[in-house]
Image (cartoon, rainbow, N blue to C red):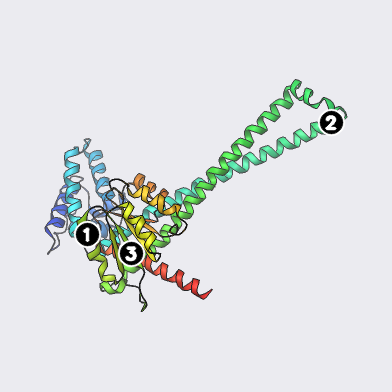
Amino acid sequence: MAELRPLAPDLTPESRALAMALRELFEGLEVSVRRYAARRVRDAGTFSRYLGGTRVPPWEVVMDLFTDIAEHRGMAATPHAIELVRRLHRAAVESSTSPRHAVAVLEQQLAEADRDSRRSTARGDALSDALLDRKHRIADLEVRLNQLEAEWSAERERAERLAAANPDVSELLHERDQLQDEVTRLSAQLHEAQKQRDEAEQRCTLLERQLEAVEQVQTVAAVTPAVSRAMPKVLIVDDQPDNLMAMTAVLSTLDQELVAVSSGREALKALLDHDDFAVIIMDVQMPDMDGYETAAHIKRRPRTHDVPIIFLTAMGTDPEHSARGYAAGAVDYIGKPFDPWVLRAKVAVFTRIYLEQRRLAGDQ
């Protein structure tokens, strides 16, 4: 097995601790970095940077490592060991504030959105085939029924009694009704699959713009939309004062007017008082009225229905919770602890979209 490269110099203590834990895990596999990267269909250089401490891997990469070690050793890691590495991972994320790490976070989200799009497309194709099959079968039954109807036209007044007495006709009618029910069900499922694909494609486009904003950044000002007129507002909703303070400090460099509130009810009131919010950043886990409930109220109001919502959640990397967030009306999410560059990029892109829409509306 090829030796691991030395740890990168000038690492933060948190990044060094995580890298050392990952290296210890990886050495238990007894394979080279290049071979393991090929096994997991990952870039060897990127994986080497994970082990060198210069980049914090997505948690999914760490869990894959635990899985592969369990398979190699024939014994799964203990919950205590996994939780220990999870704490190291969170600490490393919190200490990492470089654009490079933001790119990794956004690339992970883009991969998830792309996977959702491909799955929805595949499901839609399968449903389309099944729907076409049912429609063809219904058409065939209709032809057969019409043929029987024509043959019995001379006895039309006895059709109802004949249908009841003749098992062939009653079976055909029953089969047609069943197929029509399936067509209704499959059509609804196809519509939902197409909706999920379209939403995933929109997320992909959005994330690509966010990645572009981070990759091009040389200074904080580079992600700021270049406009001279007054900037739209950004609404920040979180019941934790420390979180509000941190997000306000991060976003204050974008020269936008920030409105920070500590509850869902205060958020609804702020949206009544102002009508020029470009985006809402909202914590999911809040007392009294959580983020999902608040988002539902926002989406029910015609005046605020189209204001994009970014959910801020400690469960952001969990597909189940992110899917629930999208279903509640969110267009994006940020996992806690949040990366400042990711937060700035997302807000900057949504601001640009808002300004583009306002300019187009003014030109009409």
Q: Callout 3: helix, strand or loop?
A: strand
Residue 234: give its label.
3
Residue 15: name its quadrant. Answer: bottom left
Residue for point 18% across, 45% down: 28
Label 1 neighbour load within 10 Å: few <14, some 14-19, many 20+: some
Mark 2, residue position: 151
Looking at the image, tell me whether mark 3 or mark 1 is earlier in sequence order.
Answer: 1
Marks 2 and 3, how far apart in space? 72 Å
Q: Callout 1: helix, strand or loop?
A: helix
Q: Is residue 8 left or right of residue 190?
A: left
Name the amino acid, label 1.
Arg
Residue 288: name its quadrant. Answer: top left
Name the amino acid, label 2.
Glu
Label 1 near label 3: C-beta < 8 Å? no
Where residue 187 sits in the image (x, y, percent)? 57, 43
Question: Which sits in the foreground, 82 or 2?
Answer: 82
Residue for point 51% across, 47% down: 192
Whether residue 1 is visible, yes or no, is no
Q: Nearer the viewer, mark 3 or mark 1?
A: 3
Name the amino acid, label 3.
Val
In the image, is residue 154 above or below residue 130? above
Marks 1 and 2, how far apart in space? 78 Å
Residue situated furthest top in the rendering: 165
Marks 3 and 1, how far apart in space? 35 Å
Mark 1, residue position: 49
